[in-house]
Amino acid sequence: MRTATKKAGIVKWVDGSPVVSFPYAGRRIIRHVSRITSNGDGNTKLRKNGLSGEFATVGVALSPHKSGGIGNLCTDASDACVDGCLNNTGLGAVFASIQHARIAKTIAYYRARQWFLSTLFHEVLVARRRAIANGKHLAMRPNVFSDIIWEDVYPSMFSQFHDVQFYDYTKHANRTGLVLPNYWVTFSRSETNHDDCLRVLSRGHNVAVVFDPGMTSSQLCKLKTDDRPKLPRSWNGFDVIAGDDSDLRFDDLRGRTRGKVVGLLLKSATHQQRIDAVESGFALRIRGRTT
């Protein structure tokens, strides 16, 4: 993973927004940060949400864990979670400019927090108005790649936008389910939190579990939906539901006293990345398939 390292910070302000500087792959990058959120149509993880027709989606795509070279946005991430992060797949694995944008926003989050939160508020406000004008509800994912505890960092955002549905995944086992009236957080399994997963499921909350499809993301995308590998029916005695049809986890089926496993097929840029995810235990083999 290419990582921004030392001396990342703001060099000046232009039109009221920060211009940041950071080293990346042996180069010095200068980037003007003018936006915080991205529209669901421009992000692979969020684009499929539009298929429901009911929701318009926006998200905040920052540089995960320590890859921004400043702070740690995923403090409970396991080693395999860091190595196999979706930040390193899709277009983010092809175009360095996408990584530059995520790192720049991460620097702004740490070095210009007041501006960052104020800009975030304005962009959610505009997105909500646009969604309403199009006859839809707004859904927002504050952590597309990060794991910020937003209910602590910016609690007023959720009360000010009480009609917006916020949702996220997390590796923090103590913040799952409906953490606020309009903020649903789904716990996510890694190779190190098996016992936490079982406890969360036993409390009636859902847990996202990644399964190995036996192929890379590009190969998977070429298959028709009916031809894709089938998820197991259960995991550790808990029913598995498909999680790749939509990213709107707050809409998932849930048991009254037993949670459900949200099955997700592993997204990997290369065969080696897929094998590493399986061998580390981060992704689980589907019975009948081998690496």
Image (cartoon, rainbow, N blue to C red):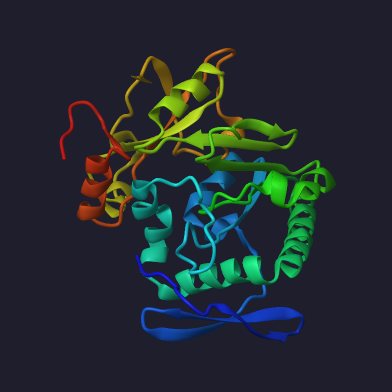
Q: Quadrant of residue 193?
A: top left
Image x and y of residue 225, in percent: 35, 38
* Left or right position of 191 against 138: left
Residue occupying image coordinates x 62% and y 41%: 167
* Residue 138 seen anywhere in this rendered image of the structure: no
Number of callouts: 0
Residue depicted at 64% across the width and 65% down the height: 109
Describe residue 48's horizontal placement relative to residue 119 as left or right: left
Rendering quarter of residue 165: top right
Instruction: Tell me the quarter of the image containing the N terminus.
Output: bottom left
Residue 257 screen position, x and y as percent: 57, 12
> Where is 90 relative to 209, above or below?
below
Most extreme residue toward the right is 160
Residue shown at 54% from the left, 63% from the top: 71
Establish if 50 lies above or below 42: above
Q: Position of residue 54 (x, y in %)?
A: 66, 40
> What is the quadrant of residue 115 in the picture?
bottom right
State the residue at coordinates (58%, 32%).
174
* Viewer can see residue 219: yes
Query: Looking at the image, which is closer to me, 41 or 2?
Result: 2
Q: Nearer the viewer, residue 31 or 229?
A: 31
Q: Residue furthest left?
A: 290
Instruction: State which quarter of the image contains the C terminus.
Output: top left
Q: Position of residue 131 (x, y in %)?
A: 74, 51
